[in-house]
Image (cartoon, grey):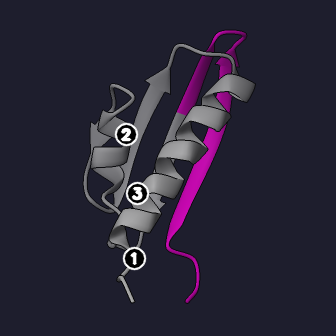
């Protein structure tokens, strides 16, 4: 177990939020950020989201949860 994914949210303005994603590798940070128009590498990526931070947090956390579940081994 342990921390697999870290996401930093930064409110740039009222309707713009930046995210920075770091992964240990099981979750592709670039793929996660690409779904929001961003990019990067498998372990480090980022994006700018044209939404207020509270809305961006909901969207990103939902996508991150799906990515973590998809990367988890099935038992």
Image quarter in which the C terminus is found: bottom left
In this rendering, would 39 be left or right of 64? left
- Of callouts 1 and 2, the N-terminal one: 2
Q: Is residue 28 above or below residue 31?
A: below
| Element class at badge 2 | helix
Q: Is residue 25 above or below residue 56?
A: below
In this rendering, would 26 be left or right of 57? left
* Residue 17: in magenta span: yes
- Of callouts 3 and 2, the N-terminal one: 2
* Image disc number at residue 45: none
* Image disc number at residue 72: 1
Q: Which residue is mark 2?
A: 33
State whether the magenta stretch is mostly helix, strand or loop: strand
Proximity of marks 1 and 3: CB atoms separated by less than 8 Å = no
Residue 27, quarter of picture: bottom left
* Image disc number at residue 67: 3
Name the spot of residue 12 as percent of width and height, x first.
65, 19
- Between label 1 and label 2, give the one nearer the viewer: 1
Q: CA distance from mark 3 to mark 2?
A: 11 Å
In this rendering, would 41 be left or right of 17? left
Name the spot of residue 11 as percent of width and height, x first.
69, 25
Image quarter in which the N terminus is found: bottom right
At label 1, counting other C-alpha atoms closer than 10 Å, the crowd grade (few under 14, some 14-19, many 20 or more) is few
Identify which residue is drawn at 28% across, 38% down: 39
Residue 70, quarter of picture: bottom left
Magenta stretch in the rendered image: 1-18
- Of callouts 1 and 3, the N-terminal one: 3
In this rendering, would 54 be left or right of 40? right
């Amino acid at each position: 177990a342990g921390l697999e994914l870290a996401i930093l949210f930064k409110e740039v303005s009222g309707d713009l939020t930046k995210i920075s994603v770091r992964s240990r590798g099981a979750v592709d940070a670039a793929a996660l950020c690409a779904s929001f128009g961003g990019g990067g590498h498998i372990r480090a990526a980022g994006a700018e989201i044209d939404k207020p931070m509270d809305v961006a947090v909901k969207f990103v956390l939902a996508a991150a949860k799906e990515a973590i579940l998809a990367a988890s081994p099935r038992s």
